[in-house]
Every structure is written in structure tokens, then in C-alpha cells.
Image (tube, coloured by chain):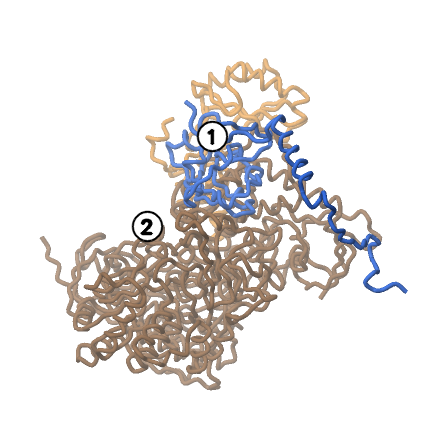
Amino acid sequence: MATLFIDNAPYQVKEGKNLLEACLSLGFDLPYFCWHPAMGSVGACRQCAVKSFRDEEDTRGKLVMSCMEPVRDQARISIQDAEAVGFRAGIIEWLMTNHPHDCAVCDEGGSCHLQDMTVMTGHNYRRFRFNKRTYRNQDLGPFLNHEMNRCIHCYRCIRFYKDYAGGKDLDAMGAHNHVYFGRSEDGVLENEFSGNLAEVCPTGVFTDKSLKQHYTRKWDMTHAPSLCQGCAMGCNIIASERYGELRQISSRFNGEVNGYFICDRGRFGYEFVNSEDRIREIGVKGKPEIKDRDSLLRTAAARIREGSVLGIGSPRASLESNFALRKLVGEDNFYHGVADTEFDLVNLTLRILKEGTVRTPTLPEIESADAILILGEDLINTAPRMVLALRQAVRRGPGEALSARMNVPLWQDAAIRQAIQQDKAPLFSITPYPVRQDELATKSLYESPDDISRIGFAIAHAIDPDVTEIKRLSDEERMWTAHMAAVLLRAERPLIISGYGAGSEAVIKSAADVAWALKKSGKDVRLSLTVPECNSMGLAMMGGHRLESALDAVAHGHADTVIILENDLYRRAEKTLVDEFLQKSRHVILLDQVYHQTAEEADVIIPAGTFAEADGTLISGEGRAQRFYQVFVPDGPVQESWRWLQQLAEACGNRTLSHLRILDDFVLEIAKTCPQFEGIEHIAPPSDFRIGAQKIARQPHRYSGRTAKEAHIQVSERKPPSDEDSPLSFTMEGYHGIPPSAVVPFFWAPGWNSIQSINKYQIEVGGPLHDGDPGRRLIEPGDAHTPVFFAEQAAPFPIRPDCLYLIPQYAIFGTEEFSVHSPGIASRSPAAAITVARADADSWGLRDGDLLEFQFNGQEYKLAIQTNQQYPRGMGTLPIGLKGVPFMDLPGWIRLKPVERS
Amino acid sequence: MDIDTREIRFSAERLAEVYEIIGRYPEGRQKSALLPVLHIAQAEFDNWLSPEVMDYVADLLGIQPIEVYEVASFYTMFNLKPVGKYVLEVCRTGPCCLVGAEKLQSHLETKLGIKPGETTPDGMFTLKTVECLAACGFGPVMQVGATYYERLTPEKADELLEQFRKENKRATYC
Amino acid sequence: MEKLENISLTGRKKVLEKKPMNFLERIYLPSIVQGLAITFKHLFKKKATIQYPEQRREFSVNFRGIHSLKRDEEGRERCTACGLCALSCPAEAITMIADERKPGEEHLYREEKYAAVYEINMLRCIFCGFCEEACPKQAIYLDGDIAPADVDRKNFIYGKDKLLEPLLK
């Protein structure tokens, strides 16, 4: 600790930080633009100037940029010094000379860092009387709006997009007073993290285009702490609503999970909540008169009582909903609504994490890994946020080394970045096809899944001879495995990444072997295994049977009534099987949010709340339990699935759920009855939590129009809904300070209206939130000192004539079921085509765009092909989950139909 | 401007020169050769850098087109719009102004009928004002292509214009 | 020592005695005559009331009546739906839905955003004028008449149909 004198008062601060961070952490209001806690300092905007004094005698001092000066013991600075105050006021006045007077029409207004800083420095009246510089704006695609006239040239956009996220199509052009931040021409911003520009930009140059469709000021929205449902990363988000419509998703800081940033699928994939395809009404086939809750419950209960019931859970439903279904139908009748391959992969993953010796990494642990091995995973499409973390990880090693050698602190971003150049920490990526992370890799190999696992096991063997040796490796493979093993052994904090992406258990096992072998040799190793959906891990931890068995149970008459929880079975099993299953079932009761093929076949449709209309708990791929909260109470019968199931159980006379009423009851019951979930009751404060006898307000204290906004429905105002499930209130009445970290509905502090107010919620700037980052890890490795290695000896991948090994390919935009309801996401989903090696296509006499006819599991399919020179031979990929691509339980061998040559 | 009809491609001789420059830098750092290559490209393709030319340079160096635009748009020496055969760059910094650069500039403006940044209708001259050319002892200074013309007077400038008209050859930096 | 109940903290305590009325007071006639005299005197004075609504009083210059949404000199709506009026409204009686101006609508809306819906709940409005003060676009003024009475509460929700200044011919 160092003693820093600020305006002659001594403060204890951490050494190694810069003055700006120190001042902000101490709670001082010091304006800044270009500095960002995640991106360090460049000293571009000159806004954070303070006076620095040599010693006590020095009365003149000199102006320094606080973001560029490290904290030194006994340093004396002044924020209040008249010259510093004047300098900062001058800078903002100068920045504002070209800034338009368009706050009234600007989407950023009310959550604008430039507004806040202008007010903070006291620049109230403009003296600039001349014409302002103007630019032409670009169309940047469906996600972001571009309004260059508002730019203050802090360079944050470029530093985030290009330097931090690795984007290649946004840059700074021109010089002095006409610098332009944009693409070379109109077009979609390609990077998967482009949406963060809306938050990184301190003013309204880049704003959320989806918000523009239904624009509302930040102060006019009801916000709630939520979780992204797009993948299993568990990124924390803030969901915001007005007029019963979800209007914006912004990132919610969680230092352990997503830091400041989220991906575009998470940010823009929310529009299904407002979609026309939403299930909002109760539907009973043949009985259109049943529209209210009670008669539905009576009808459904009668049908459930009639026969033998089975329940199909869902990896995209909350823990509470799955638990309620499991209780309703009984443990023996609870099946997982996931494809069988996926079921096996996720269960294997869980077993490895629980019984193995290696932990999963948190986000900071990924970012500090010093050697990385990726086996079979196309990360940008299966766990997008991880790629952003890996991008920081590969720079960190060289950065730290240079920082020590040059005696330049790591936060000196421009200096360190310049010194690093293209230097990278070792990252090896072995995947079936070219992927985004290749640009970070020191070496990328493209191999079939079988061969990936062989290389994985061979690396493990090279690290620890206890792992079975792999025979018949090629010379090149032998060379690379030796090299990779040596590099991993040289590292201190290696990280092994694998997961469901390659669709191969052997690949996951080989990754586990590598990690365990490294652990055995004393490394502080982490193992990250991706899982597909937001609660895949929770469902696997809960336990249950395979979907296949459910299909069998109905086929053999063991069950005839099916309750499907938030699931489209046509995405989980082949069409013919599902058709037969649904036809054979006497009653199909579906609880879901959006219409899909299964809903067409269901007899009873029960409208379930989306993440914006329900509370619940999810377990991320890391094994972290986190809570998401309802944002608003929807009109009509929509409610949480767990609540529906509890009411259904009551109506059936099933007493197992009758003592559970609110969310807390469910959470406590789960923690009590399932030891694997012990601790989830502590991840967030209970519903009776109060601060000064108040609930925490979901609405900002400036929320407007509440005596008017529903007047067209009912002139006498309705009683605002009360929230019995959470410590949050649905109105602006309640506590507005800094609540416990798990229930922060939005970030705001006096004078800090923009998302930059996160600073005030952190113990120290850039560090964890007050009260610790939310969530609790439930999976910790077993205490076995010597791991039991997997011993598998896959044969080298065989190339079979007239056959193709087809593996699933995931797409960040397109694969996920709900996010494609956002028009922007849908417009970016890839073409539904099989990609194969060019040599293979040539041998069949096919070219790009030709149709490939094939058989898989007795079904015939016909899909267009694309060729790629870098694909290994004998293997192809199919983007799955897209519209127009039928479900196939991949990976698997497909048999090609002979091509007729004309 | 015949740029549209011509294929954007360096002659073999120029290409050898470009590869020689690229060869000076370590593998993976080809971007370092960007400035000299841009100068060659500008000289080669009618003294200005069209998006097509910049894309071609990006392709040669194996970098993103936007990385070329970024650099080319930063420096005033690169012309991003078509220019006349002779680009008259008049120094407008203090010392030259003291000895008559402003007079020289207004003389050229009236003589050619164009303002700074404009090109004469016959495509012969482009007038440009530039910052200090580092020849302050010999002001007023005007740079045309790679040549400095020093201690200029309106009369001398007239002579120069005549001479250029007669030569009718594109003046470039290299 | 004074008795406790007689102590006056203010020093103004006075004990009142109720006197019995005398004869004249008891017959009330003098008081009635006195009262009628005042009444008849007013017959010859200027009337304090007017025949509203046929007759109207002149408003003070800073009288705040019904709101009107203004147009600019070219007849375009000035409101950009920035929300500051709603924010400043202490009765929370204003709500609006913003929309983007589309190409070709430049003659309708002054700036690139406009209020697609703009509603004031006149039952809630307290005519404080904060909305007028907050408006950065000089788009709302409380320069109208007194809000008319009605028997249906619904009719007090004033939308753009009632608030927007009519186009001048």
C-alpha cells in the first residue's frame, strides 16, 4: 500500500495502479473518456488532468494526466486545484465544439458519459458560434447505429473493436479535425462483440439499433438483473422493459463470468420475448372455450390423472422448473429433452469435472492462462465470450514479460501493445475445420474428431507416461504432440479447452487426460469444457433418463401422457421418431414460450414466462449457479413454468409440491433434497431481504409517466404488481443505493447516469463488485490425488468411400433456437449447406452450391454443399439448428447417393 | 482519368521494387512497407490513390484494406481524389507568409481560377496549401512533385506554370 | 403560587365568560335588518361573477391552461419525444412513444425523432408548467384554455389528436 495525498488529505491506495483508478476507487469524481478499466490507458482525451506536486513545499505543481501516472508512495496531487479544474473545463469545452446539440433525439441521452462529464466539469454554456464539422454516417448492419457527428475522438471504439476484440473492419481514418471512425464502406460490422461499442462509446456514435426500434430512455425502463440464455457461459445481463415489451439488453458486470462485455447473440437475441410467435394464451385442442387458469388446470389435471405420465425436462428451462416437473412426474419418469449424443457428452463433462482433479476456470483465470490447448472446439460459436478472454490471455504473457523488462506498467496500453506487436503466448488449436480462434493460435491443426482425440491422448502420454500410448501417429503428429506437451509443461498456468463442439466423447476425454496429467506434474492447470445450453449443466446435475428411453416408454405403452417443459422435440430427435412419439401419446401437454413444431402437435399448450417474465436459477458451464429475475409481469396467463407445474401438481392432488409456493421455497427445497445443489440458496438474497425496510427498486427514481402509461387500458391506475419471489419491487419505490451484487437491477450513481457508473459498484475500479461477484460455483473437483486416466485407443480416422463423417457445426448467429427470432441475428445466420473438403467434392464431381443427396439413419436428405480447401478429407460439417436444416443426431456417417453424371 | 479502364497492376519492374521493400522487414511485418509502397502506387497510378489501388496494395502486403485506408487518409501527401498533372503545394506556414507566400497563393488562385484543393478544368494543375516544407530560409516555397521551387515571386511562378504547360508531364514524389 | 391551569406560557391566555343575551339580542330583529341591509347594498354594486361560459374573463399573461404541442414555422411538429417533459412531471401524467422519422417525412417532423404517441392524463395534471420549462425544443406550452369538464374519465386522456396545434392554412 502507498500513501497518496489528494488535496492534502492522506489516503491508502494500492501501488501499481494509475492515479485515475486510485482516485475513482476512493470515490472521487474525476472525469475521463479514453481510459477504460478493461482496456487500460492511452492518455488520448486529456480529460483526467490533475495537479501533481513534487513535495510539501512545491506550491506550483504541474498538470499530469492521472490515467498515465502510476501511484507512487507519498505522492501529492490535487483534483480541486484551480488550474486543473480550469484545464478539464477547457478540454470539455473544446471536445464540445463539434458535438451537436442533439441530446433530445440522441439514443444515448440519459445514459451518456459525455453528458455526465460535461455536467461534472461545469461546462454549461457554449461559446462556440461557428459551423460544426459534419460527417456522413455509415450503415453498419442490423446491430449498431452510426452517427459520427457526435464523436469526440477518444479512440475507445477502435481500442475495443480492433485491439481488444480483434475486429478487422473498423478503423480510424484521416487526421486532426476530421478523424473518422468507421468501416471502409457501408456494411455489417463483422466482429461478434460489436454490440459492446454501444457501451464502450462514451457518447452516441454507436448506439443499439434494436433499441431504436422501440426507443426508451434508460430512466424510463424497468430493469432487472438477468442472465443471458444464449449459451452456457452464463453472462450476466440487465434486461429492460417498458409497455410490456423487452427493449434492451445490456451487460451486467461480473468479474468472474463476463467482465464488462457480452457477445452480440446475447445482446441482440432478446427479441423473441416480444415476438408474434410467442405463446401468450392457454390452448386446449378442441376446447377453445378454455382460456382461464383454473379451467385449464382442471382439464390438464384430469388428463394427467387419467394415465401414466412422463415428463421431459429442458436444458433451457430453469433449475426450479425442471425440479418441479421432476417432482410432478416422479424421478423415474423424468427424461432429459436433449439429443442423445448431447446427453452423453454433457454427462461425461459433468463426471470429468466432478470426479477429476482439475477445476474449471473463471474469466480472470482464462485471461491469465499462459499456455492454451483447444481440442475440437469452435469456440466463437459454442462459447463466444471465451474467445474474447483468450484474446487477452495470449497477449498477457508477452505483455507481462515486457512490462517487467521495460518497467512500464501493464495498463500503459499503447506502449505495451506496441512492444508486444504480434507476440503471443502459446495457443494450440486442433479443430475439425478452420475456426475464428486460429488467428490467436501459434499453431492450428485441422483433423477429424477421432484424430483430435488421438493427438490429445498422445499429448497426455507425452506429459505423463501413465496415459496409454497412442499407436500409429504420423511423423508430423508425433512432432507436434511432443512440442505441445513440452510447451504445456513449461507453462505455469496452462488451460485446456474442449467440449461438445466436436460431438466426440473421446475428444473430451483426451482433454481431461491432458489436464489431469498436467495437474499430476504440479501445474496450476484449468480445464474448461463447454456445454450447449444455458442450463445444460444444471439439468445434467439434476439427473434423469435419456430422451431415447422416453420415446421407448411411449412406444411400448409404459406411458401415455407426456408433459414437455420448454422444449421443441423436433430439435432433439429425428422427425420420424418425434412424430411417432407425439402421435402415440394420448395427451401432450407443453409448457413453452414460443410456438414451434412440437407446439403444433401438443394437445394442451401452457404459456410459460421467458427469462424476462420469470425468476429462476441456471447453472453455467463453469458450474456456477446464478439467479435471474423477472423484469415485468406480462398480461394474460403467462407465468413461470415452475409455478404452473406447482399449480398443476396441486390440481392433480399430488402433494409433493404443495408446501412450495414462492421461488425461495423451491430454491430451499432443491438445496435440501439434492445435495449436488447445496449452496444455491445463498447465491442471492431471499425474497424477504430488505434494505432499510425497503425492497430494491427495479425502476430508476426518475421513471416517468406511470399515471398515464396505462390510461388507455384503465384510467384509474391499477395496483402495481407485487413481487413475492424476489427482494426487488416492480416500481420505483424502494432502495436506490448499491444493493447486494446479485440483485443489481441497473447501474446508476449520482452524477453517473451511463453504464460507466459500474465504477461505483466495485470495491476497487475494475475489480469485483461490492459484496463479491455474484454466483456460486457448485462443482469442485474431487480430492483424488492420482487421477484415473481414460484409456482409449481410437483408430486413425478412416476415409470411407461413398461415406462422409458429418459433424455438427454451430453458429453464433443461427444455431440457438430463440435468438434467431431477432431479425438482426436471423439476417446473419449462415447458409444451410454442408461443407466438405474440396478434394472430396472434386472426387464426387460436385461443385459449390450443388446438391448432395445422402442417407442418414435410414432417412434421405438433400442439401447444398460448400467446399473448403482446409477441411480434412472424408469429413463434412453441417450447421445445425438453422431453419431448413432437419435434425440429425450428429456426428455420424452419412451414406452418399451415387451422383448421376449427365 | 483513365484509371477506370486500366487494370490496377504494377509493372514487373515496379513489382520487383515493391518486393525489395517488403523484403527489408521481417516475416509477418509486411505492413511496415506500407508507406513506401503507397508512394510508389501513387506515382504509378496517376498521382492519386483510388480505393481500388489501395485494395491492391492491401492485397500485396497481405493486410486488411482498411489498414491501408487508415494510413493513406492520415497523410496529406496521399491524394485520395484525382488531381491535376502538377500539384502545386504552397507553403502557408509563418516564415513563408512573412516573405509573400500569401501573395503568391492569391496570385496562383487568380491566375488559375481555382481555390486550394481544386483542380483546373483542363486537369493540368491542382492547388494545395501545405504546412512547413522545412526550407524557411528560402521562402516563399512551393513544392511540385519531388522538386522545391524557392524564393518565388508571382512572375517566377508564371514562368513555372508556362514551363509546366510545355512539359506536360505528371509530377510525382518519386 | 398561581394555580397550574391558570399559567399561560404565551402570556395571552384569557378566560372568557359567556354573558347571557339581552332582550334586543334575543329577538334577533336588529341583526336581521343589519344583514339584509348588506344584502341590498350589493344590488347596487358591480357584480362579482360573470356568465361563464358565455362570458369569459381575461387570463393573466402567465396563466397555465391546457397544453398544446407546437409546430414550427413550416408546420412541422417540434416535439422529438426526448422525454424530458415526462421526466419533470411531478404528477407523472405524461407518457410518449418515440419513433424514427422516415425518409419522406421531413415535412411532418422537425427532427429525426418524433412522438408517435403523446398522452397527458389531465386528471392527474396539476398544471405546474414544469413540462413547458423542461422542453428543450419549445414544443409544449400550457397556453390553452381551462380543461373542460366531462362525465367520462377516459376523455381526460389527451392524445396528440387533442394536443397538437392544428396546421395553419
The percent coordinates of residue A344 (x first, y second) are 31, 76
The chain carrying label 1 is C
- A385 left or right of C8 in image: left
Residue shown at 24% from the left, 76% from the top = A548
Residue shown at 46% from the left, 78% from the top = A668
Is C109 in front, or is A705? A705
Chain that appears blue = C
The percent coordinates of residue A481 (x first, y second) are 40, 72
Q: Residues within 10 Å of mark 1 (few under 14, many from 20)?
A: many
- A879 left or right of B22 in image: left
Question: SS of the residue at dot 1?
Answer: loop
Provide the residue designation for mark 1.
C71
For the C terminus of chain C, which image quadrant? top left
Marking on residue A238: none
Mark 2 and 1 residues: CB-CB less than 8 Å, in contact?
no
**Which color is chain A depicted in?**
brown
Residue shown at 51% from the left, 38% from the top = A149
Q: Is B115 rendered above or below residue B47?
A: above
Marking on residue A827: 2
